[in-house]
Amino acid sequence: GAGMRGIRLGNLVWNAPLALSAQALETAIELEACEDGTVRYQVLSPASDGSMQLHHQGMLLADPAMPAWLDLQQLRSRINKADITAQHCYASLAAGGASHGLAMQGLQEVYCSATQVLAKLALPPQMAAGAEAYLLHPTIMDSALQASVALDLADAGHGHGHGEGAGTPALLPFAMTGLDVLGACHGEMWAWIRSSATAECAALAGTSAASAQALDIDLCTPQGEVRARLR
């Protein structure tokens, strides 16, 4: 919750999907303590040939994340176009091949400009039970990514009658240069999303900057207390 010692993760890469089924899935988490105080980690699972498949890797940084606040009223005054709605975002995602069930639809309100999105997020009623068990609730985190679709819709001129039938592929994170966790993200949250430089993140994931879309995302409470920063 609020007031916790901030956790900082760095150089996060999602190397391969981890597919779940009705059968139990064996996974392993390997930790390596480094001399500089960081801890490297890897998430692996056994492959069919007996080797270990790497799914995710990153590092826990030694210095804690520092508290931060956002002025939501000021952001709303700058990012105030509301012609793209949550319904527009979900319709575009569905047209692009990503259909989110009701349990994963946490996007409530969307305000955007050419380069920024401010979105209100909330857990659907069916996900409220047990939400306190999560530090970063999956529905809230995914809904923040869903809101980034508004940048593409704004670029396509959706609010001016263009791009109505175009589908937007769901954004799947494959790398992050940093993740700061300063408190729990569940219930009602706000996400501030803006475009970022792609070079560092693309290099981390081993892809070209031209094929990547880099975003900075801050998640905060309705009072503006930042609970998570994604870079």
Image (spheres, grey):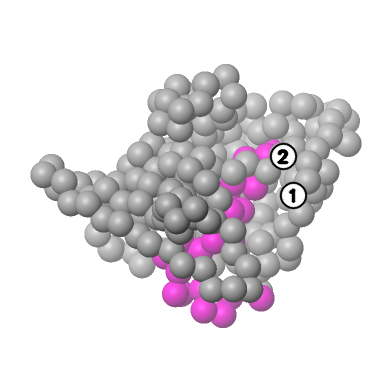
Q: Is residue 139 above or below residue 83?
A: below
Which residue is drawn at the image coordinates 74% and 63% (left, top)?
Answer: 101
User: What's the magenta region?
Assistant: 126-150
Q: In which quarter of the image is the C terminus?
A: top left
Residue 167 falls left or right of residue 206:
right
Q: What residue type is labelled 2?
A: Pro
Counting from the top left corner in percent of width and height, residue 190 is at 54, 52
- As rendered, which of 125 and 32 lies closer to the eye? 32
Which residue is drawn at the image coordinates 11% and 44% (left, top)?
Answer: 35
Q: Can you identify the residue that label 2 sits on? A: 169
Label of residue 98 in the image: 1
Q: In this view, does 123 lie above or below 79?
A: below
Question: Quadrant of the rendered structure where residue 102 is?
Answer: bottom right
Counting from the top left corner in percent of width and height, residue 217 is at 49, 42
Counting from the top left corner in percent of width and height, residue 147 is at 64, 45
Question: Quadrant of the rendered structure where residue 156 is?
Answer: top right
